[in-house]
């Protein structure tokens, strides 16, 4: 079995009372996947760090169990510090062992600070994979694996069908909370689902360290850590500071870590003001913080440092929703929901106004759209056809230089028997329309080297040493990560994407000269598992009704798969968060006015059955959806195609728009995308009406 990532839990606000649920303690330690094979034992954290060296007693116990059971296994669990040999301790007491690498120190700590692993799930039993099995069956395998005699090191997690009773037990024993798990759910590696829920009775979560302040008076090393989390736009948001919870040893150790990653500029957006002089660091250190509550301005009240977490990635740290520490049993009424939706729209409208005002002095860099004549596009398509009829590999003669193409006869779409060459010829012939739409935009690739039925993978960075004429530039992702990326706008770059195995062309919503500004806002209509395309059509009409109410112009296009994209062209000076907020205003209005059809609920399990998810979060800088006139990795070789609003009727089908049909359609309806982009929306009126 290949290495898997652990299944992750959502945050619950009440103990589930309907459905088949079981409940476990929420252990306060290090989450690991433990693999025991004849080649050895690994204890891998959720971000891929092996902790086997730090906890040799657990490694020895797992290896002894494997030899006794005479089969390999993979189990999921939590390494926990033990108090008095039998009682799980809090996370702080595990700190002395988490980061130690010296063998002598490890041997000493093994006796002074004992640890155990509480196992609660099983992924592999011998040669049998259990990930697709329900929890009850996985639990039975795990119970059968563990020794009947109680082990001080390997322990089976406690479980109960009575969540209320276990919650009371958690309060009595001072646990962090409990876990709720659906008994019939499979194990979903790497996914965060509502099949598992964290029910926390105290406020604590991870934060990213973005800097520190100078110490006061006799304080050593530093005054306070500056803490943050990543928002939906991938921006590090300041959440407050803490200087409590440290020992002299932990102050010294943290100071040593910080000095290694100091930088000159703030990683927070915006930069916070501090009482003492601030020093900034690369946002790589994750710490666990306990706090009293969130203040009205979004800061932590009375935060206390608990420890460093090297088992979690900094980019995973977000503002977690409230759980049982601040829950009520009262259900929301429709009137209350309507008021909430209204507040969301008003808040988003205010934010849009402020966002545009902040950027009013800024101006997007002008760009020169790339053009190619239909006759030149046809010449390249004919070259591709000759190469495919020949050996299937050869060199294209482009204005920017030669471009090698290979394996044009490889079938990319088995159902239609269309080849890599067919795909390249489609893009060559569509290039007079497609190149201006993707000009100057960073591109994200999803590569299918062996066709759409083969294994695929995403690629953000440009390959090294691309051919002449292929445009590559360094692009900053929210100012945190700069990478060389492919930039759209010429035929060499477009065809090079397909040569690498890409099927769709997925551009950013902004251009390389002005990545902080969006050219359009996008709303993605995403049907749930029980919503048919006919429901997507209904929601698209609902969106049009809301757009008309706000006097907004929008373009609908098929996604090429099961959804529809609604694109709102924007004028100069609208930053990415402004584009997202505009989409949020429209989406929440649709969900409020048509609650049986549409939802803005992100968790699939919490959405109304058959509802369409109106997704406004695709406007984050660096996020993409399939570009206009982009082929999709679908059996019928469909294409994401702009529509007239009168075409969105009961007869509409995504399969009508394919590699074979889109170009002839262009001769009839013209370039709807280019026409719409010439008429940008202004936001002032929308803000007032919202």
Image: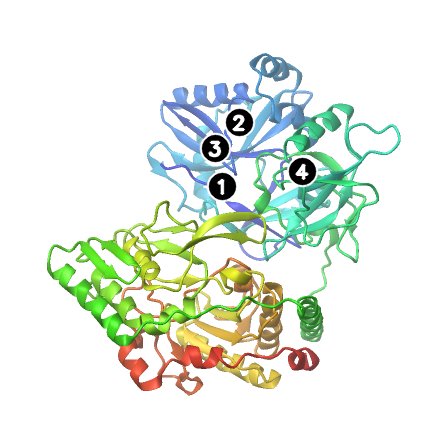
Quadrant including the N terminus = top left
Q: Position of residue 323 (x, y in %)?
A: 68, 52
Sequence-wise first label, 2 or 3:
2
Sequence-wise first label, 1 or 4:
1
The reply to whether dot 2 and dot 4 touch (C-beta < 8 Å) is no
Taking 671 as reference, is 168 above or below it? above
Secondary structure at numbered mark 2: loop
Secondary structure at numbered mark 3: helix
Q: Which residue is mark 1?
A: 6
Secondary structure at numbered mark 4: strand
Secondary structure at numbered mark 1: loop
State the separation of the CA atoms marked 2 and 4. Answer: 18 Å
Q: Which residue is mark 2?
A: 51
The mark lying in front, picked from 4 and 3, is 4
The reply to whether dot 3 and dot 1 touch (C-beta < 8 Å) is no
Sequence-wise first label, 2 or 4:
2
- Does 119 sit left or right of 686 as displayed? left
State the separation of the CA atoms marked 1 and 2. Answer: 15 Å
The mark lying in front, picked from 1 and 4, is 4
Q: Coloring scheme of the render?
A: rainbow
Q: How many neighbours does mark 1 have within 10 angstroms: few (below 14), some (14-19), or many (20 or more)?
A: many
Residue 143 numbered mark, or none:
3
Taking 610 as reference, is 649 above or below it? below
Camera-nearest residue between 599 and 305: 305
State the separation of the CA atoms marked 4 and 3. Answer: 34 Å
Sequence-wise first label, 3 or 1:
1
The mark lying in front, picked from 1 and 2, is 2
At x 31%, y 69%, the residue is 638
Q: Position of residue 326 (x, y in %)?
A: 74, 53
Q: Which residue is mark 4?
A: 287
Residue 666 visible in image: yes
At x 22%, y 65%, the residue is 422
């Amino acid at each position: 079995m290949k290495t898997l990532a652990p299944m992750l839990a959502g945050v619950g606000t009440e103990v589930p009372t309907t459905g088949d649920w079981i409940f476990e303690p929420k252990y306060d330690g290090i989450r690991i996947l433990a693999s025991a094979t004849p080649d050895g034992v690994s204890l891998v954290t959720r971000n891929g760090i092996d902790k086997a060296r730090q906890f040799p007693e657990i490694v020895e116990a797992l290896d002894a169990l494997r030899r006794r059971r005479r089969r390999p296994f993979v189990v999921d669990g939590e390494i926990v510090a033990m108090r008095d040999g039998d009682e799980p301790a809090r996370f702080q007491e595990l700190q002395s062992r988490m980061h130690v690498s010296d063998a002598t120190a490890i041997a000493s700590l093994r006796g002074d600070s004992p640890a155990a692993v509480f196992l609660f799930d099983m992924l592999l039993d011998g040669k049998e994979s259990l990930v697709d099995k329900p929890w009850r069956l996985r639990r039975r395998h795990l119970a059968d694996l563990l020794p009947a005699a109680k082990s001080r090191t390997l322990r089976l997690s406690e479980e109960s069908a009575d969540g209320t009773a276990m919650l009371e037990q958690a309060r009595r024993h001072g646990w962090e909370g409990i876990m709720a798990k659906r008994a019939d759910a499979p194990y979903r590696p790497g996914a965060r689902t509502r099949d598992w829920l964290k029910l926390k009775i105290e406020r604590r979560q991870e934060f990213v360290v973005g800097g520190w302040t100078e110490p006061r008076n006799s304080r050593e090393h530093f005054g306070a850590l500056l803490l943050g989390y990543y928002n939906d736009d991938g921006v590090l948001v300041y959440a407050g500071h803490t200087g409590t919870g440290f020992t002299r040893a932990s102050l010294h150790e943290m100071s040593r870590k910080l000095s290694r990653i100091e930088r000159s500029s703030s990683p927070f957006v915006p930069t916070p003001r501090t009482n003492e002089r601030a020093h900034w660091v690369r946002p790589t250190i994750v710490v666990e913080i306990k706090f009293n509550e969130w203040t009205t301005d979004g800061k932590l009240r009375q935060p206390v440092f608990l420890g460093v977490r090297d088992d979690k990635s900094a980019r995973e740290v977000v503002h977690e929703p409230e759980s049982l520490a601040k829950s009520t049993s009262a259900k929301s009424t429709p009137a209350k929901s309507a008021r909430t939706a209204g507040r969301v729209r008003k808040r988003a409208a205010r934010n849009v106004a402020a966002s545009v005002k902040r950027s009013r002095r800024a101006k997007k860099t002008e760009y020169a759209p790339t053009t190619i004549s239909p006759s030149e596009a046809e010449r390249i398509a004919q070259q591709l056809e000759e190469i495919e009829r020949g050996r299937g590999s050869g060199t294209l003669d482009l204005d920017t230089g030669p471009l090698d193409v290979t394996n044009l006869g490889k079938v990319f779409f088995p159902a239609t028997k269309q080849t890599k060459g067919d795909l390249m010829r489609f893009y060559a012939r569509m290039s007079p329309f497609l190149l201006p739409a993707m000009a100057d935009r960073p591109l994200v690739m999803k590569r299918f080297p062996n066709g759409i039925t083969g294994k695929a993978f995403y690629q953000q960075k440009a390959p090294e040493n691309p051919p002449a004429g292929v445009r590559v530039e360094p692009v900053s992702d929210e100012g945190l990560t700069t990478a060389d990326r492919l930039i759209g706008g010429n035929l060499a770059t477009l065809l090079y994407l397909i040569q690498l195995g890409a099927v769709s062309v997925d551009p950013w919503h902004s251009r390389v000269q002005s990545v902080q500004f969006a050219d359009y806002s996008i709303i993605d209509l995403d049907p749930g598992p029980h919503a048919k395309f006919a429901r997507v059509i209904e929601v698209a009409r609902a969106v049009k009704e809301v757009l008309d109410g706000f006097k907004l112009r929008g373009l609908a296009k098929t996604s090429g798969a099961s959804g529809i994209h609604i694109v709102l062209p924007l004028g100069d000076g609208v930053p990415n968060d402004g584009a997202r907020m505009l989409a949020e205003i429209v989406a929440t209005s649709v969900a409020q006015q048509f609650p049986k059809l549409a939802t803005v609920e992100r968790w699939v399990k919490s959405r109304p059955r058959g509802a369409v998810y109106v997704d406004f979060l695709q406007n984050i800088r660096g996020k993409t959806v399939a570009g206009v006139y982009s082929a999709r990795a679908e059996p019928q070789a469909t294409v994401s195609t702009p529509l007239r609003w009168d075409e969105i009727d009961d007869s509409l089908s995504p399969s009508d728009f394919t590699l074979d049909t889109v170009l002839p359609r262009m001769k009839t309806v013209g370039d709807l995308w280019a026409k719409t982009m010439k008429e940008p929306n202004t936001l002032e009126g929308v803000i007032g009406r919202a």
